[in-house]
Amino acid sequence: QVQLVESGGGLVQAGGSLRLSCLASGSGFVINTMAWYRQAPGKQRAFVAAVTSGDSTNYADSVKGRFTISRDNAKNTVYLQANTLKPEDTAVYYCNALGRASGSAFDSWGQGTQVTVSS
């Protein structure tokens, strides 16, 4: 089993920045893709960004040019640098990891971190 713990959320004014982190822990695992999703009040969870083990990245159109995803494989950590934040970025941000552990595939989620952007 792989556990994910997010950190770095908070309250920020529009135009500001935050850096979210997600630490993966467990034993005998290999992570292929790490991603961030977000869920705003009253809305479904939505894709934000992803990074593969080969460092290929993909972004939702709504965050392109403002958010940057990166990963540190040695630390089993993925980051989301969120710049030029807008009120519509307000949401709970969740970390997701896809990979294999003990010969089986896993799809793990963190518990989320709240990001609130004030206007």
Image (cartoon, helix red, strand yellow):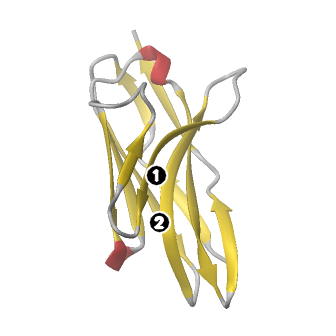
In the picture shown, does residue 52 fall above or below 9?
below
Task: Estimate the spatial distance between the alpha carbons at disc 2 and disc 1, rounded to whole Å.
Answer: 9 Å
What residue is at 42 percent from the left and 73 percent from the top?
Answer: 76
In the image, is 19 to the left or to the right of 116?
A: left
**Where does the image place residue 73, in percent across and percent down from the top left?**
35, 74
**Where does the image place residue 9, in percent across and percent down from the top left?**
45, 40
- Label 1: few (<14), some (14–19) or many (≥20) C-alpha neighbours in 10 Å: some
**Where does the image place residue 32, in percent across and percent down from the top left?**
49, 70
Residue 87, quarter of picture: top left
Return the mark for residue 65.
Answer: none
Q: Quadrant of the N terminus?
A: bottom right
What residue is at 55 percent from the left and 42 percent from the top?
Answer: 37
Q: Do the residues labelled 2 and 1 touch (CB within 8 Å)?
A: yes
Return the mark for residue 23.
Answer: 2
In the picture shown, does residue 23 fall above or below 37?
below
In the picture shown, does residue 100 fall above or below 46?
below
Which amino acid does the dot numbered 1 rest on?
A: Ser
Return the mark for residue 7.
Answer: 1
**Where does the image place residue 20, in percent across and percent down from the top left?**
40, 47
Query: Mark 1 or mark 2, which is nearer the start of the sequence?
Result: 1
Q: Which of marks 2 and 1 is in front?
A: 2
In the image, is 17 to the left or to the right of 90?
A: left
